Amino acid sequence: MTCFFCKGNMIESTTTFMVQLDNCIVIVKNVPCHKCDQCGEEAFSFEVSQRLEQIVDKCREALTEIAVVNYTAA
């Protein structure tokens, strides 16, 4: 797999995903991704993207200011 931006090599890795909702920040640690070994660009598989959406939806319902979630435990 090659990077969309720089054409570098994409390797399997993990990252921290963060999103800001209205009044809440959701941080998801240890998210599987493909990361470019040249520029650092990250890409998620369709399955991981769907799981991140589910995690964020659950946090949105919790009505908390900051939520830190471990991807593998969610």
Image: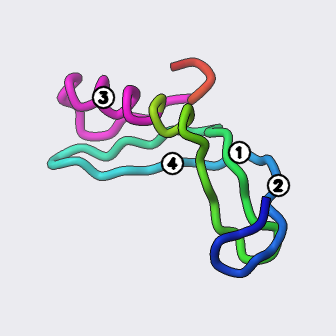
Q: Earlier in the sequence, mark 2 or mark 3?
A: 2
Mark 1 — residue?
A: 14
Mark 2 — residue?
A: 11
Q: Is residue 34 left or right of residue 72?
A: right
Identify the magenta region.
52-70
Q: Residue 59: give its label.
A: 3
Name which residue type carries label 1.
Thr
Name which residue type carries label 4.
Phe
**Marks 1, 2: nearer the viewer:** 2
Name which residue type carries label 3.
Cys
The image shows residue 28, relative to residue 20, as above or below, that is: above
Q: What colour scheme has been applied to the protein in the rendered image? A: rainbow
Q: Is residue 56 magenta?
A: yes
Q: Are marks 2 and 3 in contact (CB under 8 Å)?
A: no
Instruction: Give the residue displayed 57% in from the left and 29% down from the top.
Output: 71
Please state the horizontal and vertical placement of residue 38, each as a whole percent of the image.
80, 76
Instruction: Give the residue displayed 80% in from the left and 74% down from the top.
Output: 8
The image shows residue 4, relative to residue 45, as above or below, that is: below
The image shows residue 39, relative to residue 49, as above or below, that is: below
Q: CA distance from mark 2 to mark 3?
A: 29 Å
Q: Earlier in the sequence, mark 2 or mark 4?
A: 2
